[in-house]
Image: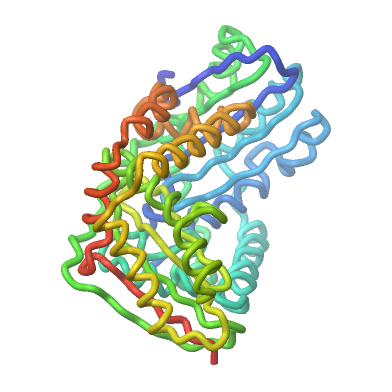
């Protein structure tokens, strides 16, 4: 549109419902290091009433709709689903939120308290709640992925002032930094008219030019240990991996499935089932747009030493670096990935979110070539990626001891 808002329409007349999804190109990585947790705070503030609508949820529920939102280090996403004949209600609500929030000291105080309680409940008082605060600080020295979406410190949200909040809103939550996806029982021409009617007059704002410091290549292994009041020792290891748009992302993703994707995975079979060193063990990554982390974390069986568990884990890492994987093993995780993609595509809400994400990555059409990129990965690619990622100098290890 003229004000920079990108609008995508996905018609699916097999459902009576419609989904309105707005993705903002703003996440925790875009925060001031002295004012972290703001993107997540906004997720709460956006439901606290906008300039012409004091209560967001009530009119949507009257129209038969439901809504939610989430914030990551890379983006913020708001979505609602409602019967298609009531879709204009969603346009009215979302456009007013984009026009301007109802900034008030009262609303900020309420949401600040909610977020602070969430921080305390999930990250301070919860067993193992600070694991990723500690690991991110260890793994990143420069890039803003070194803090979590909830924020680096509780005080940053506690001290958030109304002026800071307004500045953050008008910097990031503008049409020029947003993608609107409408999916379901809708017609493109009608959506075009509704988009012009409800969003066309909103000032575009200034396009946010991201200029984040790149994380330097890690040249030596890093290690930290901590003691906490938890029931079991935990071992957490991470390695840097390519970002979402890098060719190396796909083999890295498949490697995490081979090592830790459920009960038949290598790590579970060897270290949980056979050697009984861990009570549970996972391997995954964070799917971040900028270069991210492959992570392995597990709770140790009582009586097993950290050193014994770490050595056994190292042996499994050496195996994949030296011998790679078989064609059968690779095909199995490709099949699993294909079924995950297929199941996700069955839901119109999931499709709307995916279209917004791929448009944010550069082109919504990427959604149609994603599976092909996984299918092209070879056993040689897995071997090469394993050797790059699991280089000892690229590793970060956290021993999380039970007191």
Between 164 and 264, the residue placed more toward the observer is 264
Location of residue 113 (image quadrant)? bottom right
Could you tell me which residue is drawn at 45 percent across and 31 percent down? Answer: 175
| Left or right: 248 as drawn, with respect to 123 | left
Location of residue 32 (image quadrant)? bottom left
Residue 8 horizontal/vertical position (percent): 49, 20
| Left or right: 70 as drawn, with respect to 368 | right
Could you tell me which residue is drawn at 53 percent across and 55 percent down? Answer: 40
- Residue furthest to the top in view is 189
Could you tell me which residue is drawn at 33 percent across and 43 percent down? Answer: 251
Between 175 and 353, the residue placed more toward the observer is 353
Residue 220 horizontal/vertical position (percent): 19, 72
- Residue furthest to the right in view is 62
In the picture, the quarter occupied by the C terminus is bottom right
- Residue furthest to the bottom in view is 403
In the picture, the quarter occupied by the N terminus is top left
In the depicted structure, whether residue 233 falls above or below residue 71: below
| Left or right: 287 as drawn, with respect to 386 | right
Could you tell me which residue is drawn at 25 percent across and 42 percent down? Answer: 381
- How does the figure colour the protein chain or chains? rainbow
Between 128 and 312, the residue placed more toward the observer is 312
Residue 77 horizontal/vertical position (percent): 54, 41
Residue 95 horizontal/vertical position (percent): 59, 30
How many numbered marks appear?
0
Between 192 and 388, the residue placed more toward the observer is 388
In the depicted structure, whether residue 19 falls above or below residue 107: above
């Amino acid at each position: 549109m003229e004000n920079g808002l990108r609008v995508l329409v996905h018609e699916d007349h097999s459902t009576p419902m419609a989904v309105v999804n707005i993705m903002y190109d703003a996440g925790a990585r875009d925060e001031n290091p002295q004012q972290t947790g703001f993107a997540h705070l906004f997720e709460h503030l956006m439901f606290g009433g906008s300039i012409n609508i004091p209560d967001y949820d009530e009119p949507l529920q009257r129209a038969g709709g439901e809504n939610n939102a989430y914030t990551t280090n890379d983006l913020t996403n708001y979505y609602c689903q409602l019967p298609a004949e009531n879709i204009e209600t969603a346009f009215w609500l979302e456009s007013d939120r984009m026009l301007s929030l109802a900034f008030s000291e009262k609303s900020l105080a309420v949401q600040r308290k909610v977020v602070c309680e969430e921080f305390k409940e999930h990250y301070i008082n919860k067993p193992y709640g600070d694991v990723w605060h500690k690991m991110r600080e260890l793994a990143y020295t420069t890039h803003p992925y070194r803090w979590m979406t909830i924020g680096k410190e509780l005080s940053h949200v506690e001290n958030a002032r109304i002026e800071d909040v307004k500045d953050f809103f008008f910097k990031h939550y503008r049409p020029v930094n947003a993608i609107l996806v409408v999916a379901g029982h809708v017609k493109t021409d009608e959506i075009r008219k509704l988009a012009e009617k409800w969003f066309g007059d909103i000032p575009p704002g200034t396009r946010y030019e991201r200029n984040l410091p790149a994380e330097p290549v890690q040249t030596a292994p890093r290690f930290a240990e901590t003691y906490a009041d938890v029931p079991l020792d935990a071992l957490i290891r991470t390695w840097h991996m390519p970002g979402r748009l890098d060719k190396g992302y796909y083999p890295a993703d498949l490697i995490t499935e081979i090592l830790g994707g459920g009960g038949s995975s290598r790590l579970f079979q060897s270290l949980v089932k056979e050697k009984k060193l861990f009570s549970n063990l996972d391997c995954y990554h964070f799917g971040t747009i900028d270069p991210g982390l492959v992570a392995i974390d597990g709770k140790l069986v009582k009586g097993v030493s950290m050193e014994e568990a770490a050595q056994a884990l190292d042996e499994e890492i050496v195996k994949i670096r030296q011998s790679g994987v078989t064609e059968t093993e690779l095909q199995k995780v490709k099949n699993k990935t294909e079924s995950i993609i297929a199941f996700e595509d069955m839901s119109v809400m999931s499709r709307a979110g995916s279209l917004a994400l791929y448009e944010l990555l550069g082109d919504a059409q990427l959604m149609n070539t994603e599976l092909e990129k996984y299918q092209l990965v070879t056993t040689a690619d897995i071997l090469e990626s394993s050797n790059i990622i699991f280089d000892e100098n690229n590793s970060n290890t956290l021993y999380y001891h039970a007191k």
